[in-house]
Image (cartoon, grey):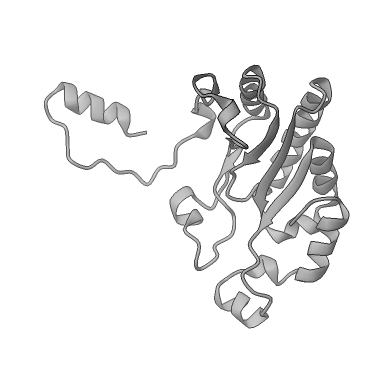
Amino acid sequence: ILVPEFIKDLEHGAAKKIYSTMEKPDIRKSPAPRYDLADVNLYGTLLLQFSRGCPFSCEFCDIAELFGRVPRLKSPAQFIRELDCVFSTGYRGPIFLVDDNFIGHKNEVVNLLREVKQWQEEKDFPFSFFTSTSIDLAAENGILDLMVDCGFYMVFLGLETPDENTLYAINKGQNIKHNMYDSIKIIHSRGLEV
């Protein structure tokens, strides 16, 4: 967002020491990572991202402040192009989707997962996936099924405490709505490691 302003100022000999904005960048404008420049054989896992931001506002977390409470998303087509970039390197293995909360925008995640499932089937499942998500994933049967169908094998959940009073105090209501133990059992029952 700020680079064009900086370059313009620099060309006019008026560059400032600090540039800042409250605007969040549109990640649909992000170019695909240049995995072709890396020796992917040196990596046990590669990273991709579909969204930035999280709809929750947990008291201890900086995600909402840094990246926003409204998830910003790539299009499924953009994400598939990025999978193609990774595939073209010859890499075959796990990909960590580094989203702040993968299911932060559930309808769009369903659209993405449908595309990824088709892509994985066409390519004979070259990748497995893992990601970070909120515990309310357990209540999303359709998303859970699609994740497994796409080759997800693990999810990271924020399970700071089972104590409801502490969860209220840290504004982590999504972990109060569902029984933590039962939610983990549901996710495990679908074959996903927590």
Q: Residue at x 44, y 51 (%)?
A: 66
Residue lying at the far bottom in this picture: please name it. Answer: 165
Q: Nearer the viewer, residue 108 or 34?
A: 34
Residue lying at the far front in this picture: please name it. Answer: 42
Residue 128 percent across, percent down from the top left: 74, 36
Write down the quadrant of residue 12 in the picture: top left
Q: Residue at x 88, y 56 (%)?
A: 189
For residue 117, side relative to residue 36 (left or right): right
Residue 160 percent across, percent down from the top left: 61, 70
For residue 3, side relative to residue 115 (left or right): left
Quarter of the picture containing the N terminus is top left
For residue 50, side relative to residue 6 (left or right): right
Quarter of the picture containing the C terminus is bottom right
Q: How many marks?
A: 0
Residue 5 percent across, percent down from the top left: 27, 30
67 w.r.t. 123: above or below: below
Residue lying at the far right in this picture: please name it. Answer: 189
75 w.r.t. 109: above or below: above
Write down the quadrant of residue 19 in the picture: top left
Write down the quadrant of residue 15 in the picture: top left
For residue 181, side relative to residue 97 (left or right): right
Q: Nearer the viewer, residue 98 or 57?
A: 98
Residue 186 percent across, percent down from the top left: 85, 60
106 w.r.t. 187: above or below: above
Q: Residue at x 71, y 39 (%)?
A: 129
Q: Residue at x 79, y 63 (%)?
A: 184
96 w.r.t. 36: above or below: below
